């Protein structure tokens, strides 16, 4: 279809999984072979590309070479006029883990560990799994969720966009217990933040929330000051404990989140692009 378009037509292809766009496993299968040929033709025809995270640009540039143009139009846009920004903790603290419950995206055992630790330390907190339980792994996590009295989840239901946004607006933190290294459905290895983008980062931008991520997860430089990085869940609990003792710590982080998201307004993006 791209080949049939007039030469004057501008085509920009958004690449979500960089390695998968260049690699195909088990090419001897007819469908995989067709996919590999199709991706090769796209790479030959298309001159402009987009990635959803600034941090993904170097990896795509390395793969494409110097003759192609790469844009960064982020996955989320901040529309601050419709948000009320809060600078203090709720009681109990609300931690939200958005997105489908899927082992290829997030490690939910870290969420259970954090809940148990906060409960042990008598820190009033609640958590919401804001997404659908997927596959066998999802059912395991669902069964475990039923035994947690400080956890809200949506059983097997889809979460519609209004409810998704409403719950995120009530969050004190967006928690992304991301797996950093994953394998896609077609068997190709990807690295979150480097060759694949997380939808959670778009949620962080849209809602201007402080967020919690693994130590080794790469994010855009604009967002680096509004996140808490952890090696273990004890690191997260330590920050929450210190912020309860000194509310200024959360206020500073919350202000940093708002400032970061203000770099992703329509006006700022037009200026940058």
Image (tube, helix red, strand yellow):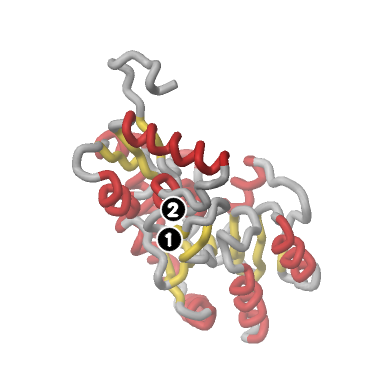
Q: Are marks 2 and 1 in contact (CB under 8 Å)?
A: yes
Q: Residue at x 78, y 56 (%)?
A: 155
Q: Nearer the viewer, residue 62 or 240?
A: 62
Residue most toward the left? 66
Count residues near mark 2 (Cα–Cα under 10 Å), then give few for <14, some for 14-19, many for 20+: many
Residue designated by label 2: 196
| Percent position of residue 162, x then y | 64, 41
Residue most toward the front? 28
Q: Nearer the viewer, residue 80 or 1?
A: 1
Residue 178 has which mark?
none
Q: Residue at x 26, y 48 (%)?
A: 61
Quarter assignment of residue 81:
top left
Can residue 173 be seen in this snapshot? no
Quarter assignment of residue 72:
top left
State the SS at label 1. Answer: strand
Q: Is residue 102 left or right of residue 246?
A: right
Count residues near mark 1 (Cα–Cα under 10 Å), then give few for <14, some for 14-19, many for 20+: some
Please say if 61 is above or below 234: above
Q: Nearer the viewer, residue 51 or 244?
A: 51
Please say if 154 is above or below 92: above
Mark with earlier residue (2, 1): 1
Q: Residue at x 72, y 46 (%)?
A: 158
| Percent position of residue 95, x then y | 59, 65
Q: Is residue 137 left or right of residue 243?
A: right
Can residue 141 be seen in this snapshot? yes
| Percent position of residue 94, x then y | 61, 64
State the SS at label 2. Answer: loop
Residue designated by label 1: 191
Q: CA distance from mark 2 to mark 1?
A: 6 Å
User: Which quadrant: the C terminus?
Assistant: top left
| Percent position of residue 204, x then y | 47, 53
Q: Residue at x 44, y 45 (%)?
A: 16
């Amino acid at each position: 279809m791209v080949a049939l378009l007039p030469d004057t037509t501008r085509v920009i292809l958004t690449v979500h999984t960089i390695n998968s766009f260049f690699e195909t496993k088990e090419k001897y299968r007819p469908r995989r072979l067709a996919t590999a040929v199709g991706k090769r033709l796209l790479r030959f025809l298309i001159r402009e590309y987009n990635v959803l995270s600034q941090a993904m640009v170097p990896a795509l540039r390395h793969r494409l070479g110097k003759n192609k143009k790469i844009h960064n139009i982020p996955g989320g846009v901040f529309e601050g006029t419709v948000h009320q920004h809060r600078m203090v903790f709720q009681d109990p603290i609300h931690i939200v883990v958005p997105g489908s419950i899927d082992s290829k995206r997030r490690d939910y055992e870290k969420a259970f560990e954090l809940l148990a630790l906060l409960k042990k330390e008598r820190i009033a907190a609640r958590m919401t799994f804001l997404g659908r339980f997927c596959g066998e792994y999802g059912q395991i996590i669902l069964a475990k969720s039923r035994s947690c009295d400080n956890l809200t989840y949506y059983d097997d239901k889809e979460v519609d966009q209004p409810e998704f946004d409403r719950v995120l607006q009530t969050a004190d933190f967006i928690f992304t217990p991301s797996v950093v290294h994953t394998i896609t459905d077609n068997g190709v290895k990807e690295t979150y933040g480097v060759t694949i983008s997380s939808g959670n980062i778009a949620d962080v931008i849209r809602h201007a929330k402080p967020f919690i991520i693994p130590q080794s997860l790469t994010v855009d430089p604009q967002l680096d000051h509004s996140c808490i990085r952890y090696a273990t869940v004890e690191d997260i609990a330590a920050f929450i404990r210190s912020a309860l003792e000194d509310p200024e710590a959360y206020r500073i982080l919350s202000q940093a989140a708002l400032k970061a998201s203000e770099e992703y307004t329509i006006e700022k993006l037009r200026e940058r692009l």
